[in-house]
């Protein structure tokens, strides 16, 4: 497959899950990073199960696409609304997320740390600050 375009409802869900889990990486055959979309059926649904990535060494990024979720990062809680981003580059951070309303939707991306080789020019970002 060279490319694919699908509506979300065309991406199968993992059967038996307690929420709507669309395994994007699996469905599209992606190998450079993990990608999953989680949709809460009810308030209180566990969107991201409590875990860390100590064994895999993965960095993860979560994007709340709809609704609100409560993220716990090493026990520190953060309420994140739609279009909020949670970045977890440190694999040992314990993380989890719970839906604060039905329909809350979180996109989870992850992969092992590597030196990313962008095709964009570094000069384009010289005046763009980084979070430290």
Image (cartoon, helix red, strand yellow):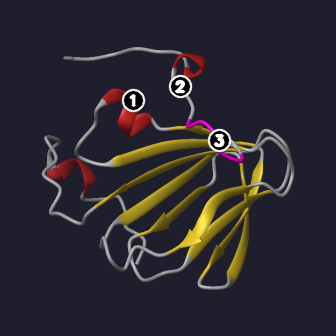
Q: CA distance from mark 1 to mark 2?
A: 8 Å
The residue that label 2 is drawn on is: 12
- In this rendering, the answer to whether 94 lies above or below 110 is below
Within 10 angstroms of label 1, few (less than 14), some, or many (20 or more) residues?
few
Q: Nearer the viewer, residue 65 or 4?
A: 4
**Where's residue 1, x and y in %?**
21, 17
In this rendering, which labeled residue sits more in front, label 3 or label 1? 3
Q: Secondary structure at mark 3?
A: loop
Q: Secondary structure at mark 2?
A: loop
Circles 1 and 2, Cβ within 8 Å, touching? The answer is: yes
If the image is split into quadrants, where does the C terminus sit? bottom left
**Where's residue 15, x and y in %?**
60, 36
Which of pointers 3 and 1 lies earlier in the amino acid sequence? 3
The residue that label 3 is drawn on is: 16
For the point 84% across and 43% down, the residue is 102
- In this rendering, the answer to whether 49 lies above or below 110 is below
Q: CA distance from mark 3 to mark 2?
A: 12 Å
Q: Secondary structure at mark 1?
A: helix
Which of pointers 1 and 2 lies earlier in the amino acid sequence? 2
Magenta-tinted stretch? 14-18
Within 10 angstroms of label 3, few (less than 14), some, or many (20 or more) residues?
few
Question: In the drawing, what numbered circle is on residue 5?
Answer: none
98 relative position to 121: left or right? right
For the point 36% across and 80% down, the residue is 54
Circles 3 and 1, Cβ within 8 Å, touching? The answer is: no
**Where's residue 96, x and y in %?**
62, 68
Question: In the drawing, what numbered circle is on residue 27?
Answer: 1
Q: CA distance from mark 3 to mark 1?
A: 17 Å
In this rendering, which labeled residue sits more in front, label 3 or label 2? 3
Q: Main secondary structure of the magenta part?
A: loop
Circles 3 and 2, Cβ within 8 Å, touching? The answer is: no
């Amino acid at each position: 497959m060279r490319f694919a375009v699908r509506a979300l409802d065309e991406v199968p869900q993992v059967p038996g899950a307690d929420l709507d889990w669309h395994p994007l990486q699996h469905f599209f055959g992606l190998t450079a990073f993990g990608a999953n979309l989680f949709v809460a059926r009810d308030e209180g649904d566990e969107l991201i199960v409590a875990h860390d990535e100590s064994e895999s060494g993965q960095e993860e990024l979560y994007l709340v696409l709809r609704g609100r979720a409560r993220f716990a990062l090493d026990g520190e809680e953060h309420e994140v609304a739609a279009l909020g981003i949670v970045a977890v580059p440190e694999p040992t951070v314990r993380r989890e997320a719970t839906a604060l309303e039905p329909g809350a939707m979180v996109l989870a991306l992850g992969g092992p740390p590597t030196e990313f080789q962008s095709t964009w020019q570094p000069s384009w970002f010289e005046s763009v600050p980084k979070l430290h």
